[in-house]
Structure formats: C-alpha cells, structure tokens
Image: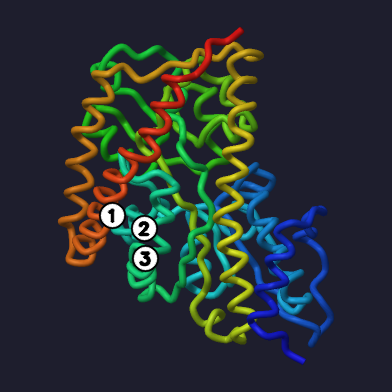
Amino acid sequence: MRRSAAAALAALALLAGCGGTPHSADAPAPAAGAGRTWTLVSTAPRGLPGPWSGIERFARDVERASGGRLRIRLRGAGEVVGAFEVFDAVAQGRAELGHGAAYYWRGKIPEAMFFGGVPFGMTAQEMNGWLYHGGGLALWRELYAPFGLVPFPGGNSGMQMGGWFREELAGPEDLRGLHMRIQGLGADVFERLGGVAVSLPASEVFTALESGLIDATEWVGPYNDLAFGLHQAAHFYYAPGWQEPGPPLELLVNAEAWAALPADLRAVIEAAARALNDTMLAEYTARSPAALRRLVDVHGVALRPFPPGILAALRRESDAVVDALGASSPQASRIHESYRAFQAAVTAWHEVSERAYLDAREATASPPP
C-alpha cells in the first residue's frame, strides 16, 4: 500500500536524528518492480566534504523515508559528465538529478547568477529567508522552467573566504594582471579591476595554483580549502568572501521525472532537499573553525583581511555589475528588484538584531585569562 505524503514526511523527520553511515552510492539497484533508481550527477568531485557528504545524506534520507521505493545513485564530476555539463545532463534526461552551483550555467542563463552568490549580497540565512518566504524560489523555478528543470536550494557553505594568493596584497593596483580562479559575478568584478578571471572546476584548482597557471584562487572556506591542500600552493589567505557571502548550491530535478513521481515521493524529495539545505550549512558552521585553526596554527598560513582600499574598490564595482545584470532582461529586472528589496528589509532588521547582538557580545566579553 502506498505510503501517504504525511507519513513520508514524518519518517524523514525521524531520520534527522538518526546516525549511521550513508548508503553506498554504488550499491546495486533494487530488483525490477521493487522501486525506482535515479541518478544524481554532481559538479563536485566524489568525497568533497560538504557538497558530497551533503548529497550522501540526501540519498540516504530519500531511500529510508521512501521505504526503498526511491534510491539515488551518486556520480561525481567527470564520472558520467563533466562539472560544467550537469545542467544539460539533467535537462536532457540523462540524469534525473543534478547538484551544483547556478553560476556554472551563466553562459546559458545569465540571470541564474542571482541564485549562485551575489557579491556583497545576502548571507546564507538571508538567502534562505528570501528563497523560502520572500518569493525567491518561485522566481528561480520560473527561470528554469523553459529548460525542463525544477530547482531546489541544495545546501550552503555560509560566508566564504576571499581566497588564496601567492603574494601579499597592498591595494587595488595589486589585482591588475593577476590571474585568479573566480566564478560568477565575482569574476566580472575582478576583471573590472584589471584582473584576469579563470574558470576552473574543483578538480583542477590545486594543480593550477601550484603550477603557477593562476596566481590566486577563491574556493570555499577552511573546511574545503584544507581538504584540497590549497595552503601548500599559496601562503596568503584573505577574508572576507565578498564574492560569495552566502552562496546557495542547487538541487536540479528533471521536470518530466518529477511529474512522473507519485505525490508522496515528491514530498520525500522536497523534505530531503530542505534537510540537505539546512544540514549542510550546519556542517560548515561546525567544521570551518577547527579547519581555520589548523591552517593557521599548524600550517602557518598568513591570514589577512583585505586592505580597505581593495574592499572599497570591490564594493564599487560589485554594485555596478549587479545593477547591470538586473537591467539585462525583463526577467532579470524582476529578480533583481525582489532580491534588493528583501536585502534592504533584512539588513534593517539585522541592524537591531544580529549585528547589534554581535557588537554587544564582543563589547562585553570578559578578557581572556
């Protein structure tokens, strides 16, 4: 007898508190007639902390909450399709699911970059507010509908780092001629300041930096950067991540495959996607502090704030780039207006909530013993 959507959601809620090892993405599919097996292709390499561990949890939750009626087979970047081919693979039905970042498809849908991290834009908490309760998700789905895709928020690293540099920075002039791996709108900003933006998938970042093919790279933050060994290729680590302050990843679902699912399995996917989005942010929040301490205390990384002159130049050019994108099409204009209105409202609220509290906590902290 088919499990109701309510029962499936209840089962998934119980799974949130369960431990256990994620199921093997390479396990054999159920016997014919026993259920469905979907393939998820990722822009991340297999085993990358955060994105990969997140989709492992997602696959486990879907299988367990559906009672085995839907299983997810995971494939990392390059195993079935390249990192930059995930969007097309899901749109064409070669895979039912994809996981990646919206800025990878900028050549196909420039407006998608509003959903992949906006320079000096909203944080992860603010993005989730806009997507789930401010109309952002509806705009996202409207944008992807012509391609036969249904997007879901698929995780967030939270505030990223500004990147790894082989040489120390003093002012905006140091960015001129610098070759940096940087994606999305941040790449446009960097080039407006005279830099050379290089687009590379995750699997090529370390080698390019170590070999000198690039002079700098932004990646994610301490949790992933330590795992990638980027400290072995560059010494200076800059903050904050102005280019991606709260960049959502996305879970893409093929629209035809989605429509063919019974209502209760769609409810399972929806709930598992929400869990993926929430839990990944918690994972980064928990793991990044220790990773940063290890980078600095054990590996001797030089942690630096961006010089004020560089931040001011980046902010000026960021505003110009984002406004230009917002004026690029009627759909971009609607998304931009919604994004900016929500950001303004939530910024006003955070002045008397998050920022006020953090300032108070710092000001009243007892001195270390």
Q: Is residue 159 above or below residue 9?
A: above
Q: Are marks 2 and 1 in contact (CB under 8 Å)?
A: yes
Q: CA distance from mark 2 to mark 1?
A: 7 Å
Could you say where residue 145 lies in the image, as x and y percent from the top left?
38, 75
Q: Are marks 2 and 3 in contact (CB under 8 Å)?
A: no
Q: Farthest residue to the top: give it.
A: 369
Please tell me which residue is depicted at 50% across the width and 13% down the height of the picture. Answer: 302
Please tell me which residue is depicted at 59% across the width and 32% down the height of the picture. Answer: 288
Circle number at residue 311: none
Rendered image quadrant of residue 304: top left
Q: Identify the residue under disc 1.
A: 342
Tell me how many marks there are: 3
Q: Please tell me whether mark 2 sits on a helix, a strand or a loop.
A: helix
Q: Identify the residue under disc 3.
A: 140
Q: Identify the residue under disc 2.
A: 130
Q: Pick the quarter of the image with the N terminus.
A: bottom right
Of mark 2 and mark 3, the one earlier in the sequence is: 2
Q: Residues within 10 Å of mark 2 (few under 14, many from 20)?
A: many
Residue type at the position of mark 1: Phe
Please tell me which residue is depicted at 17% across the width and 49% down the height of the picture. Answer: 324
Q: Please tell me whether mark 3 sits on a helix, a strand or a loop.
A: helix
Residue type at the position of mark 2: Trp
